């Protein structure tokens, strides 16, 4: 298969994934609304459980929102024809890497270097 076909296949996967996430987000949204509706529960324990579920759903939705943003960015890169090219060296990122990491914007070598710079650089900020 040609690289163009491989890229189209990845685009297809990303679009399908985007649809799946959006419908999952809708489901989570509905659950969250249902939880908010039973706010007045007098049982403290159940409230605590609802709060935990609320928190879990909220962070799930936050993760989904972030993934949709990454998918949109990848689709935009496809539209402008820069998807699959390393932002550092400009060479094609191997298709195997893109299939495993469709959001990759660097070849493996540059990604490793970039990570090291982020972690070891003088302005390195501690990560949680
Ligand atoms: Zn590179």
Image (cartoon, grey):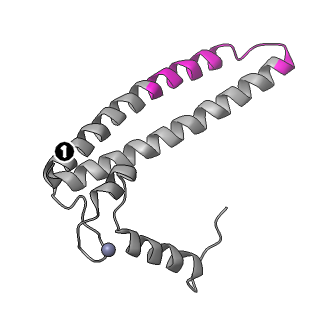
The percent position of residue 99, horizontal first and vertical second, equals 33, 50
* Region in magenta: 24-45
Name which quarter of the figure residue 104 lies in.
Answer: bottom left
Name the residue located 67 percent from the left edge and 61 percent from the top edge: 128
Q: Is residue 70 above or below residue 81?
A: above
Q: Nearer the viewer, residue 21 or 54?
A: 21
Name the residue located 59 percent from the left edge and 34 percent from the top edge: 58
- Residue 36: say if magenta: yes
The percent position of residue 84, horizontal first and vertical second, equals 25, 60
Q: Is residue 3 left or right of residue 25?
A: left
Name which quarter of the figure residue 68 lies in.
Answer: top left
Count of marks overlaid on the render: 1
Which residue appears farthest toward the front when viewing the image? 1
Residue indicated by mark 1: 8
Q: Is residue 35 left or right of residue 1?
A: right
Q: Residues within 10 Å of mark 1 (few under 14, many from 20)?
A: few
Q: Is residue 99 above or below residue 89?
A: above
């Amino acid at each position: 298969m040609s690289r163009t076909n491989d890229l189209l296949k990845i685009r297809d996967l990303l679009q399908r994934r985007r649809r799946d996430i959006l419908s999952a987000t809708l489901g989570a949204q509905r659950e969250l609304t249902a939880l908010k509706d039973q706010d007045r529960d007098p049982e403290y324990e159940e409230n605590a459980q609802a709060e935990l579920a609320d928190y879990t759903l909220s962070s799930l939705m936050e993760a989904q929102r972030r993934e949709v943003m990454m998918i949109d960015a990848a689709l935009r890169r496809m539209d402008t024809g820069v998807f699959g090219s390393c932002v550092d060296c400009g060479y094609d990122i191997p298709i195997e890497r893109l299939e495993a990491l469709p959001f990759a914007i660097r070849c493996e070598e540059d990604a490793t270097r970039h990570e090291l710079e982020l972690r070891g650089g003088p302005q390195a900020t501690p990560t949680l």
